[in-house]
Image (cartoon, rainbow, N blue to C red):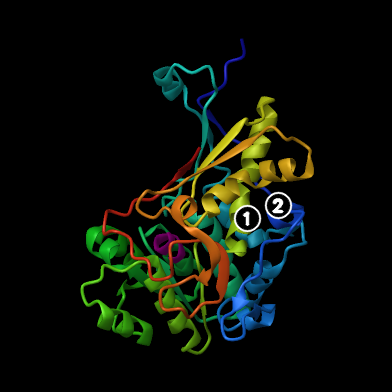
Amino acid sequence: MKTIPHRLYLSEDQIPTHYFNLRSAMPEQPDPMLNPGILQPVKEEELYPIFCEALAHQEMDGSTEFVEIPEEIREVYKMYRPSPLVRAYHLERALGTPAKLYYKFEGNNTSGSHKLNSAVAQAYYARTQGIARLTMETGAGQWGTALSEVCSSFGPGLDVFMVKCSYEQKPFRKDVMRVFGGRVTPSPSMTTEVGKKILAMDPETTGSLGCAISEAVESAVSHPNSRYVLGSVLNQVLLHQSIIGLESETTMEQLGEYPDIVVGCAGGGSNLGGLIAPFMRDKLTGKHTGARFVAVEPASCPSLTRGRYAYDFCDTGKVTPMARMYTLGAGFIPSANHAGAFAATA
């Protein structure tokens, strides 16, 4: 009987050279984002004041199958990639299951999560365009940590709007961001017009990602040579996170295995989306139709299971384009429970 190591590593030269664009395999494209002023599909150039031009193009591109990963990004990836695929032998025994259980561990880097995959790319494209300052939101703090770390090397200044309850619950997380040079502000704050409005309606609010996104976008578009970066949800982020699934696919091929069930956490969705990308491609194209995909979401913010599928704003202040999605409402504020994060993908 073949013994499978506890941890399976690819070699450095097996880091993917291209991201995979899952939308290129979709027979029908997702509904477009809408300009809220005219309720018409957003054009790529309309995103230029918010995102770097290269990222705006990736956001709108539904046809390019593979996008080359610049060598400078791959050099950074080599510090922590390829990430291991781990066989969960003890969990198998505890469950008494004949199934083989694997998880892709994405926490073996300074930021502690998969967020670094997209942070490296977004900071690189910002620096390439000559952007001097980036703004962003962060909830649990992993996205803020990842961007702070990369910006300390690549150069754009960084302003982080951190959900207020997490800012208060996780003092060491904001300290890590500040060590790397990130300027951290609890959100909602009095530093933006939308923050002032939210606080005027509820001075005791603990905040939400929707609030923090509103502030970060307003700050980006109201300052010269600034752009906004988002750590999940967007097509561009799913593209960057596809590196998780591509590595998993290669490792499974070396094992002579193919997954029957692929499970991932789904908050903003890029962790799940990145993991399933090549396997979902196989299902959409008919190459392999057996895999089942399971999204696991927090009960405190159950958008997939309790939300309605409709066009809505992506932020509380209603300054972003509208997207068709499962939504609990742009004004939804989750309970102020401790915000954890995920470093492993099952």
Above or below residue 223? Residue 328 is above
Q: Name the residue type under label 1.
A: Arg
Along the line of sight, which residue is nearer the eye, 172 or 188?
188
Disc 1 to disc 2, C-alpha distance:
8 Å
Q: Earlier along the polypeptide chain: callout 1 or callout 2?
A: 2
Direction top: furthest residue: 1
Q: Circle 2 sits in a helix, a strand or a loop, which is it?
A: loop
Q: Is residue 107 magenta?
A: no
- Contact? badges 1 and 2 (CB < 8 Å): yes
Residue 346 spot, x, y in % from top left: 50, 37
Disc sitting over residue 256 in the figure: none
Instruction: Find residue 58 and report its image quarter.
Output: bottom right
Residue 37 spot, x, y in % from top left: 57, 86
Q: Circle 1 sits in a helix, a strand or a loop, which is it?
A: helix
Q: Which residue is mark 2?
A: 17
Q: Is residue 154 visible?
A: yes
Q: Which residues are magenta?
A: 143-147
> Within 10 angstroms of label 1, few (less than 14), some, or many (20 or more) residues?
some
Q: Name the residue type under label 2.
A: Thr
Q: Which residue is mark 1?
A: 74
Residue 317 spot, x, y in % from top left: 41, 78
Residue name at image x 69 percent, y 72 percent? 57
Instruction: Find residue 49 and report its image quarter.
Output: bottom right
Look at the image and tell me in which quarter the N terminus lies.
top right
> Within 10 angstroms of label 2, few (less than 14), some, or many (20 or more) residues?
some
Residue 277 spot, x, y in % from top left: 65, 47
Residue name at image x 33 percent, y 81 percent? 195
